[in-house]
Image (cartoon, rainbow, N blue to C red):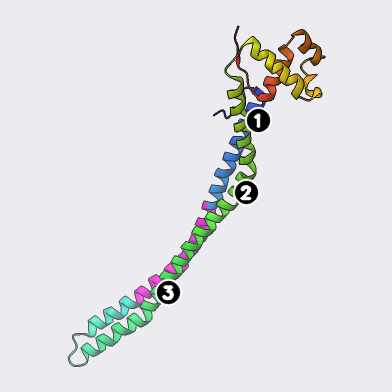
Amino acid sequence: MRFYSDIPAPRTAAILSDLLVLLLLVLLAWLGLRVHDAVAEIASVPRGVSDTGGAIQRGFESAGDAVGEVPVVGEPLAGALQDAGEGAGGEIAETGREGEEDVNNLANVLGALFFLLPAVAVLSRYLPHRIADVRRLTAAARAIGPTLTPERERTLAMRAAYGLPYERLVRYTRDPLADLESGRYDGLVAAALDDAGLRPSRFG
């Protein structure tokens, strides 16, 4: 698997693009965490309600324990106070706990969405082109091989002369067809290798 071109300019551009996308994903993850933490702070409100309900329930229970030893009326009064604590403070505490759980769930969902939606949008636009580049480089490296024999140079020169646009060929040689006819392959080979993004070593 070949991820980057051997040509300096395309290799640098690909590396910078990969780093930029990685940095963007890190920033999106940071933003998702910030959103999560900001929403999670709201949970302090229902948490306070839950604490208040628990305090009310404990207050009624303490009062029930205090009057429980009173003869005749102590036990019924203690039971009534405990029931009142469960009915009032218990319901308030349960409502607060449910509210805190709902807020935490909302924080998790919003934090994930603020990261995932932009990240998917970025990767869906970037990855197909990047994967295509990697496949092209890998296929070219396998087809051309690590070394160039004179016969392979001739084949590459023919591929460049017959397959690349003339406006690209003239950047490497003034007369690409004359070079091919006379066996001057350097310019054509350079054009073919630049197009493939490779720099194999010469042999022979």
Callout 2 amino acid: Ala
SS of the residue under disc 2:
helix
Q: Is residue 121 above or below residue 83?
A: above
The location of residue 10, given as percent across then percent down, is: 66, 27
Q: Which residues are magenta?
A: 33-56
Callout 1 amino acid: Ala
Callout 3 amino acid: Thr
- Determine the residue positioned at 47% across, 67% down: 102
Q: Neighbour class for label 1 at 10 Å: few (<14), some, many (≥20)?
A: few
SS of the residue under disc 1:
helix
* Quadrant for the N terminus in the image: top right
Q: Earlier in the sequence, mark 2 or mark 3?
A: 3
Q: Which mark is residue 13?
A: 1
Most common secondary structure along the magenta stretch:
helix
The location of residue 80, given as percent across then percent down, is: 29, 87
Q: Is residue 195 above or below residue 97?
A: above
Q: Earlier in the sequence, mark 2 or mark 1?
A: 1
Q: Which mark is residue 121?
A: 2
